[in-house]
């Protein structure tokens, strides 16, 4: 059964303090791993898709990396506006178009 | 980028009434859309997969007669919560499947907050 586990559950950082969020996954044939950002009361906003181990993608202060067992979302010099819940999700070849979400990491950046 | 809209964004209704939520893909065609439910501080729970022109596929434990899904066109799916009760109060989010590269990325609507009195 496909599974996604995210850690930590919550993370509080000072503005400018870099850190990483972890996403561990098990899937029978990875078609893609996705990162989303979700603000309170809103739908998830698409950030990245990673397809294979060793791949990296960047967007502003965020960089996502992928290995065969986990993905990291690195946030460099975060700002208060980066505060949100970050969701990791995977899609396997056996699941058609369905994606399985992790429980998310609530990130809070203090000014 | 791919844009998905939902309407209404917020609805309050009396117990026993039915509520319809619309999900539209604005700049792409979506043969598949998904409906999720989210409780406070929890992740998204997939309710059903909506396929254009065919019956929806419901996840285990989701009542088909309670949550009616219709995917009438390549840009519109609707979720009707029938005879709503207070326990149906939740945040409902739809997504549309947009194939990019080798993975089937999903783009999400802004969500609908349903409150049943």
Image: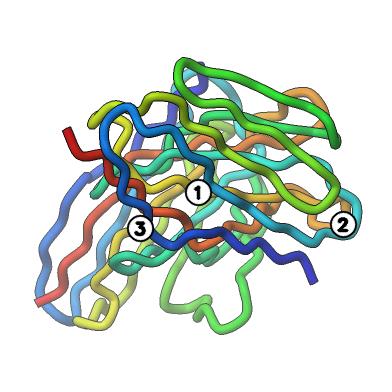
Question: Residue B25: percent from the left, percent from the top?
Answer: 48, 29
- Marks 2,1: beta carbons within 8 A: no
Label 2 SS: helix
Task: Chain letter for mark 2, please.
Answer: A
Q: Is residue B53 found left or right of B80 in the rendered image?
A: right
Q: Residues within 10 Å of mark 3 (few under 14, many from 20)?
A: many
Closer mark to the observer between disc 2 and disc 1: 1
Figure quadrant of residue A4:
bottom right
Going by the picture, which residue comes out furthest to the right? A29
Task: Chain letter for mark 1, please.
Answer: A
Gap between marks 3 and 2 measured at Cα: 26 Å
Residue at label 2? A94
Q: Quadrant of the C terminus of chain A?
A: top left
- Marks 1,3: beta carbons within 8 A: no
Picture residue at 59% right of the left edge, 19% below the top: A58
Label 1 SS: strand
State the residue in front, B64 or B115: B115
Identify the disc placed on residue A87: 1
Picture residue at 50% right of the left edge, 81% below the top: B63
Q: Is A44 rendered above or below residue B4? A: below
Picture residue at 50% right of the left edge, 43% below the top: B95
Residue at label 3? B92
- Marks 3,2: beta carbons within 8 A: no
Gap between marks 2 and 1 measured at Cα: 21 Å
Gap between marks 1 and 3 measured at Cα: 17 Å
Picture residue at 46% right of the left edge, 66% below the top: B68
State the residue in front, A56 or A87: A56
């Amino acid at each position: 059964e496909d599974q996604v586990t995210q850690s930590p559950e919550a993370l509080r950082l000072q503005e400018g303090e870099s850190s990483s969020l972890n996403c561990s996954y098990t899937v029978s044939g990875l078609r893609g791993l996705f990162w989303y950002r979700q603000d309170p009361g809103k739908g998830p906003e698409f950030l990245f898709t990673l397809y294979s181990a060793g791949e990296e993608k960047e967007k502003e202060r965020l960089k996502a990396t992928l290995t065969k067992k986990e993905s990291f979302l690195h946030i460099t010099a975060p700002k208060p506006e980066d505060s949100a819940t970050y969701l990791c999700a995977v899609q396997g070849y056996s699941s058609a178009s369905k994606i399985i979400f992790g429980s998310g990491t609530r990130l809070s950046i203090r000014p | 980028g791919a844009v998905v809209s939902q309407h209404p964004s917020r609805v309050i209704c009396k117990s026993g009434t039915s509520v319809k939520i619309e999900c539209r893909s604005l700049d792409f065609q979506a043969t598949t859309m998904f409906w999720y439910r989210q409780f406070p501080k929890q992740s998204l729970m997939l309710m059903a997969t909506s396929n254009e022109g065919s019956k929806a596929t419901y996840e285990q434990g989701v009542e088909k007669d309670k949550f009616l899904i219709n995917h009438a066109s390549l840009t519109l799916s609707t979720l009707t919560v029938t005879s709503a009760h207070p326990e149906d109060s939740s945040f409902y989010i739809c997504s549309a499947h947009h194939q990019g590269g080798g993975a089937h990325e999903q783009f999400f609507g802004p969500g609908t907050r349903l409150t049943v009195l």
